[in-house]
Image (cartoon, rainbow, N blue to C red):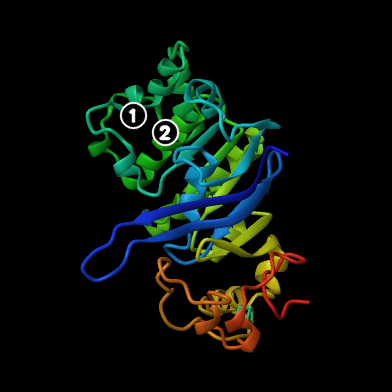
Amino acid sequence: MLLHATGLEKTYATRATAFRRASRVAAVAGVDISLAEGGALGLVGESGCGKSTLARLLLRLIPLSAGRILFEGRDITALPEAALRPLRARMQLIHQNPSAALDPRLSVAEVVAEPLRIHGHDPRGRVASLLAEVGLPGDFLHRYPHELSGGQKQRVCIARALALAPRLLILDEPTSALDVSVQAQVLELLAGLRAQRGLAFLFISHNLAVVRQVCEQVAVMYLGRVVEQGPVDAVLGNPRHPYTQALLASVPRLGAAGVVVVGEAPNPAAPPPGCPFHPRCATAQEACRNGPPPALRNGVACHLAQ
Ligand code: SF4
């Protein structure tokens, strides 16, 4: 297994204000994630459900409150920053917004060469081939971010992420800031790179159709927890958790029989008692209000799951 994480938790303390008491917010609560070499796992759920926080925990960009992370079989949970550095080369993050990810003062050549230089490699000859790999011609080397389209900027970010020959790409909504016409091209590029380089993807998205296209496995998150997990065709083709059913019902093209999710996601600082989804769940029962659902059982965390 390339990545194996168990019991991941991230809690934040909130300060007291005139309107509310200090409290603790669980952004990620008891999540287990596994990703095989060359595999692709989609992470889906509404905004604020903890997807991006989970990604940053896995990369050790923010401290864990609890849990354990194995990468390439090595326990990286408590590795000091100096020991993490060489591992970071093999686990790279691609952001949603390429404009924010690129330093406007650096040319394309400098942007792509930077990680090579930081890790002590000679970038000469490597940068042009990385650009070619993401479908950009050599004359882009001397351009600056403001001279690029959104799709071209994301290609530069991908080239930069590939510079150190990673094994894992964590892609945080990588096409959501792009024009629809460009999204398909970038997804096609990513699929080709994955096949050629044997990359594993942790693919964060709210777009279920894209996750179905890119990934073999999917985990559905609600309020910091994974509520359903399994092969993408099974989970998105025959969803068993009421939240997954509601997410799918809200995408007419993917259309699942079921109810559309109602209301806003609750405040993570004051989650409902019992199952945190119960105020929005059409099949909630008394047990759902009285106690939390069981841990994932056969890929589903719900009182009513068989
Ligand atoms: Fe709905 Fe109850 Fe299942 Fe929660 S545990 S998803 S409220 S049926």
Q: Residue at position x 33%, y 62% from top?
A: 22
Query: Residue at 51% of width from left, 78% of height from top?
Result: 250
Total numbered labels: 2
Q: Going by the image, does 207 lie left or right of 216?
A: left
Is there CB contact under 8 Å for labels 1 and 2?
yes
The three-letter amino acid code for the residue at tag 2 is Leu
Q: Is residue 212 visible?
A: no
Q: Quadrant of the N terminus?
A: top right
State the residue position of label 2.
136
Query: Residues under labels 1 and 2: Cα distance?
Result: 7 Å
Q: Is disc 2's CB within 8 Å of ligand 1? A: no
Local SS, label 2: loop
The one nearer the camera, 297 or 212, is 297
Quadrant position of residue 100:
top left
Q: Which quarter of the frame holds ligand 1?
A: bottom right
Left or right of 16 in this view: 49: right
Residue 2 visible from this viewpoint: yes
Q: Is mark 1 within 8 Å of ligand 1?
A: no
Q: What SS does tag 1 mark?
A: helix
Amino acid bearing label 1: Phe
What residue is disc 1 on? 140
Percent position of residue 281, x then y: 56, 84
Q: Answer few, some or many: residues within 10 Å of disc 2's Cα (few below 14, many 20 plus, some between 14 and 19).
A: some
| Quarter placement of the C terminus | bottom right
Q: Position of residue 172 (x, y in %)?
A: 46, 49
